[in-house]
Image: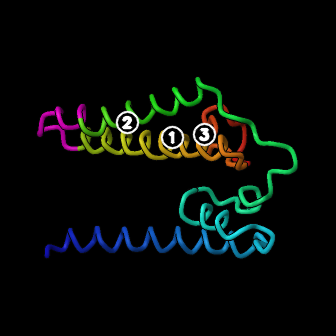
Amino acid sequence: MSDAMSSWKVMWILAVAIYAGCKAVTWINARTAHAPVWRQTAYLLGWPGMDATRFLKSTSGPKCSMPLSNEWRAASAKVVLGAVLLFGVARMIPSHHQYLPGWLGMLGIVLTLHFGVFHLLSCFWRTLGFNARPLMNHPMRSTNLG
């Protein structure tokens, strides 16, 4: 195995371990005794967000906002645009451009996963009554880090 391949494996192992550790900490600190096991499992395995308290809270209180059809379409469009950048445009760049395909591929991954798939998951969970706000909620409109 090449050194580059083992470096990639180490990077992914570290990324998954850090994510799983943070997810576990938020789950433990959320005082999850009130939530049914199926809801806790949904949080741990089916939702990438880190707000366990909000996700696990019973929906008997104020309901979360249901996604509108245009929100579903926007999230789907981000997935498609990201996939086109990643699997189409980035591969058509001539090889003498060293960094452009990498940057387009990275942009495609971010659009597909963080802005697309995670938004679709938010729509899915909110349709089922979970309080799962989109993770990338208009970051370009933000005025502060909070």
Crowd around label 3: few <14 · some 14–19 · many ≥20 (10 Å): many
Residue at the spot 80% in from the left edge and 57% down from the top edge: 58
| Image spot of residue 93 (x, y percent) | 18, 33
Q: Which mark is residue 82?
A: 2
Residue position marked by numbered label 3 in the rendering: 123
Location of residue 113 with respect to 141 vertically, above or below? below
Q: Which residue is mark 1?
A: 115
- Label 2 sits on a secondary structure element that is helix
> Going by the image, does 74 lie left or right of 131?
left
Whole-percent x, y for residue 41 in the image: 60, 67
Region in magenta: 88-98
Between the C-alphas of marks 3 and 1, the distance is: 12 Å
Label 1 residue SS: helix
Q: Quadrant of the N terminus?
A: bottom left
Could you tell whether 62 is left or right of 69 in the image?
right
User: Between residues 44 and 19, which one lies in front from this camera angle?
Assistant: 44
Name the residue at the right extreme: 61
- Give the amino acid at mark 3: Cys
- CA separation, marks 1 and 2? 9 Å
Q: Nearer the viewer, mark 3 or mark 1?
A: 3
